């Protein structure tokens, strides 16, 4: 039980800006094990964003504005961790010719044209989708989008080679297949509890397809994964799920 609680704390400390006590005896392999809790922490993030959106709607804020403010609150909660990854891969993949040049651009903290545009497209898609989802499904939809979006990351991590020997992904290490399987099971369970079977299944397919496309693109562009690639994949999956659910529930 202590290991599971340590994993939740480690995953929360990594995925959010919430202050968390450092687990005793923490080692790199402990963080790798904490990947199994990514979907659960994602569900908490989604619930927080959803409840904020509902609160804003309840006090009379228009749906579009409520969605924008709630998504902004989510960015504050997570420190824009995954959004930064999405922008970096857009700048790198779009701005570099050779793999080495793409990786160098991805290291640059400055935001380029491709990165700005992909963030605009992603935010606009999530914003319009969330505004279209009815009150009764807002929290559930966000819980599923955030849980599944993070649930695919452990499998991506073990499936792709490192694009470089240093960086966040390489330093963090790869989870084993059992850890990745637990993450998937938790993510699917959250989806099935939150949505109807068909909507949960479609959301899971959307998450898996998004991860596959980003992984394929990363393999072709830079030869494998970086932390930015994983963060970008989360954002693509999250956006795809919200758009899907808006189409089905709105």
Image (spheres, rainbow, N blue to C red):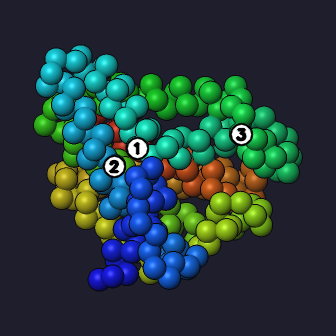
Residue mark closest to the camera, 1 vs 2: 1
Crowding at label 2, few (<14), some or many (≥20) Cα neighbours within 10 Å? many
Kindly indicate whether the residue at mark 1 contacts the one at mark 3 (C-beta within 8 angstroms): no
The residue sitting at 53% across, 47% down in the picture is 81
Label number found at residue 108: none
Element at label 3? loop
Label number found at residue 77: 1
Q: Nearer the viewer, residue 229 or 196?
A: 229
Kindly indicate whether the residue at mark 2 contacts the one at mark 1 (C-beta within 8 angstroms): yes
The residue sitting at 13% across, 37% down in the picture is 136
Element at label 2? helix
Where residue 170 sits in the image (x, y, percent)?
A: 68, 67
Crowding at label 3, few (<14), some or many (≥20) Cα neighbours within 10 Å? few
Q: In the displayed structure, does residue 67 sit left or right of residue 140?
A: right
Where residue 66 sits in the image (x, y, percent)?
A: 28, 24
The residue sitting at 40% across, 49% down in the picture is 206
Q: Nearer the viewer, residue 217 or 129?
A: 129
The quadrant in which residue 230 appears is: bottom right
Q: In the displayed structure, does residue 88 sit left or right of residue 250?
A: right
Decide: is 214 above or below 88.
below
The residue sitting at 46% across, 69% down in the picture is 22
- The N terminus is located in which quarter? bottom left
Label number found at residue 109: 3
Q: CA distance from mark 3 to mark 1?
A: 20 Å
Q: CA distance from mark 1 to mark 2?
A: 8 Å
Where residue 152 sits in the image (x, y, percent)?
A: 46, 60
Query: In the rendered structure, which disc, 3 or 2, sits on the residue that comes first in sequence?
Result: 2
Where residue 212 sits in the image (x, y, percent)?
A: 54, 55
**Residue named by callout 2:** 45
Query: In the rendered structure, which disc, 3 or 1, sits on the residue that comes first in sequence?
Result: 1
């Amino acid at each position: 039980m202590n290991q599971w609680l340590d994993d939740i704390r480690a995953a929360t400390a990594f995925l959010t800006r919430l202050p968390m006590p450092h687990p005793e005896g923490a080692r790199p392999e402990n963080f790798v094990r904490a990947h199994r809790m990514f979907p659960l922490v994602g569900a908490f993030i989604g619930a927080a964003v959803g409840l904020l959106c509902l609160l804003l709607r309840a006090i009379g804020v228009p749906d579009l504005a409520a969605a924008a403010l709630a998504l902004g609150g989510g960015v504050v909660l997570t420190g824009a961790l995954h959004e930064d990854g999405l922008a970096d891969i857009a700048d790198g993949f779009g701005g570099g010719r050779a793999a080495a040049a793409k990786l160098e651009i991805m290291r640059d903290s400055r935001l380029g044209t491709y990165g700005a545009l992909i963030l605009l497209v992603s935010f606009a898609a999530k914003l319009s989708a969330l505004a279209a989802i009815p009150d009764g499904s807002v929290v559930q939809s966000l819980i599923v989008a955030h849980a599944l979006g993070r649930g695919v990351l452990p499998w991506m991590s073990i499936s792709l080679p490192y694009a470089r020997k240093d960086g966040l992904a390489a330093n963090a290490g790869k989870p084993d297949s059992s850890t990745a399987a637990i993450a998937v099971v938790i993510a699917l369970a959250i989806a099935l509890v939150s949505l109807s079977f068909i909507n949960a299944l479609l959301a899971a397919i959307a998450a898996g397809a998004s991860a596959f496309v980003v992984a394929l693109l990363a393999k072709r562009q830079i030869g494998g994964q970086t932390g930015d690639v994983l963060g970008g994949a989360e954002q693509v999956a999250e956006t795809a799920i919200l758009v899907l659910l808006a189409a089905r529930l709105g």
